[in-house]
Amino acid sequence: MRRMGIGLQLFTLRDDMASDFTGTLRKVAELGYEGVEFAGYGGLSAEEMKQLLDELNLKPIGAHVSLQNMRADLDKEIDYLLAIGAEYLICPYVAAEEREDAEAWKSLFGFLGQAARRANEKGLKFAYHNHAFEFELKIGDQYVFDALYASAPEHILVEMDAGWVQYAGLDTLQYIADYAGRLPLLHLKDFKGMINNQINTVELGQGEINLPSTIQAGSDAGVEWLIVEQDRCQNPPLESVATSLKWLQTNYLNQF
């Protein structure tokens, strides 16, 4: 087993971040997370953000950047991430109206490939974060998930969300192995059935995911960061991310 970094996708704490961005980031550092993945910057300039991250000894892994923001000013998004010392710009989601059929996806592949090449030219890595809908439609004989990465193999990296792959009914461990060497970021999401017709995300170790096997597969595949993400929390979000980190400390980090 390799030692991978432990990060947090800050979307999990979106309400706390909205009310107190800096204070919440401090609490994340105090809990013991090593890195963070942004979902917005709380109005801080790149200089202010870098100073805060340095003070807290938090590694800026990267950021989830919406398609809307990428289209509006991709260079601005890239330059901000470079200025704070991040490595990854990640496309986090595709709205339903942009993925109605195979042709819509093919058009999107073209844009994502261009964005990835631009990021690479400027020294940033580009990744895509999946949900379950990438496994609901095929383009030819490939799921959308696989067709995307085949469209620009040298540019677009994988940020695989293990919870969503299993939720879609696929073999998560096999998918991790299939993308070995191209999968630097692995989102750890546990879930337990459905709630209000949506995936019921829970703290790590409390759901249906075989997390030890998933982490081992990530290690074997060359994953750099294990990133905690909980879409919706039944407990206060800071409490939830603390519980998930404690699970990782007990079941993963204690062997190093």
Image (tube, rainbow, N blue to C red):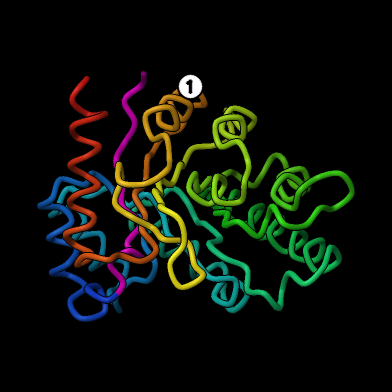
Q: Residue furthest left?
A: 30
Q: Is residue 150 above or below residue 144?
A: above
Could you tell me which residue is drawn at 77 percent across and 60 percent down?
110
Q: Badge 1, how many Cα within 10 Å: few under 14, some, many 20+?
A: some
Task: From the viewer's side, name the closer residue of 180 and 123.
Answer: 180
Q: Is residue 98 above or below residue 125?
A: below
Figure label count: 1
Name the residue located 36 percent from the left edge and 18 percent from the top edge.
1
* Viewer can see residue 240: yes
Q: Quadrant of residue 246?
A: top left
Q: Which residue is mark 1?
A: 220
- Residue 184 position within the rendered picture, expressed as x and y whole percent measured from the top left: 49, 37
Look at the image and give the residue range highlighted in magenta.
1-14
Q: Nearer the viewer, residue 16 or 213?
A: 213
Local SS, label 1: helix
Q: What residue lies at 53% left-to-right and 70% top-to-bottom?
A: 66
Residue at 43% x, 67% y: name it.
Answer: 195
- Amino acid under disc 1: Asp
Residue 217 magenta = no
Front-lying residue, 169 or 9: 169
Q: Position of residue 164 (x, y in %)?
A: 53, 52
8 part of magenta stretch: yes
Residue 218 in the figure: left or right of residue 169 = left
- Asked whether the viewer can see residue 126, the reply is no
Image quarter of the C terminus = top left
Is residue 53 shown left or right of residue 1? left
